[in-house]
Amino acid sequence: MSKIRFMSDTPNKNYFTTGQMRNALIQIEDQMVHSNWMPNIILGINRGGCIPGVYLSHRLNTVHEVLDIRLRDHTSKPNLTTLEKAFAFQKKILIIDDINDSGATFQYILDNFGKHEDRIKFAALINNKPSKVKLDYHGYEINKEEVPSWIVFPWEEWDK
């Protein structure tokens, strides 16, 4: 696991680069190899997990689909249909997001599907140590209690 260095000229706002994303995905892949576990399908959580999920699916030559669970800033109920289908037909499912911040998204999945350690694994490019959900795989680790900041991913801002 690497220490993360951000490039930022804005207080409380840190920019995550595409190079950092690639490095995080390589680390996630290495962790999966060392744990002797590889997915049959990768579900990228909409929207932040879509791009990392696609990158990783190409690297691993694995199917990718989008899982539409948007808890922040949305009033509609999350759609678990993709996960339900994957759970019914796939043996090993990797669910990936850009950041495990509070853990609410991953916790929502756990609350609805339970913990199936042999079948469902969780990954994020960045893991926030105080999160209520512990990930199986991650690229970088931060502690937002010590350094509170907003992380901006390359797909979130056109100007940077």
Image (spheres, rainbow, N blue to C red):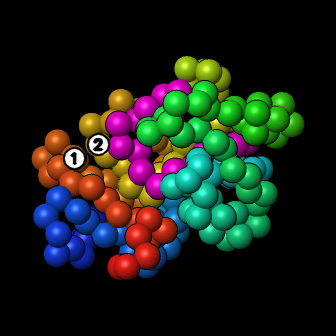
Which numbered dot is residue 60? none
Q: Give the side of residue 129 with respect to residue 69, left or right.
A: left
Q: Mark 1 vs mark 2: which is more N-terminal?
A: 2
Position of the C terminus by quadrant: bottom left
- The percent coordinates of residue 157 (x first, y second) are 41, 70
Q: Give the side of residue 155 with respect to residue 4, left or right.
A: right
Q: Secondary structure at mark 1?
A: loop
Q: Name the residue at 62% across, 21% down.
A: 112
Q: Residue furthest front?
A: 75
**What residue range appears in magenta?**
91-108
Q: Quick check: is 102 in the magenta stretch?
A: yes
Q: Residue furthest right?
A: 89
Q: Secondary structure at mark 2?
A: loop
Q: Is residue 95 visible?
A: yes
Residues packed near mark 2 inside 10 Å, few (<14), some (14 to 19) or many (20 plus): some
Contact check, label 1 and label 2, Cβ < 8 Å: no
Q: Name the residue at 82% across, 35% down.
A: 85
- Between 38 and 144, the one nearer to me in the picture: 144
CA gap, disc 1 and disc 2? 8 Å
- The percent coordinates of residue 55 (x first, y second) are 62, 68
* Amino acid at pointer 1: Lys
Q: Name the residue at 50% across, 36% down.
A: 74
Q: Which residue was labeled with disc 2?
A: 129
Residue 130 figure quarter: top left
Q: Which residue was labeled with disc 1?
A: 144
- The percent coordinates of residue 75 (x first, y second) are 52, 30
**Is label 1 or label 2 in front?**
1
* Amino acid at pointer 2: Lys
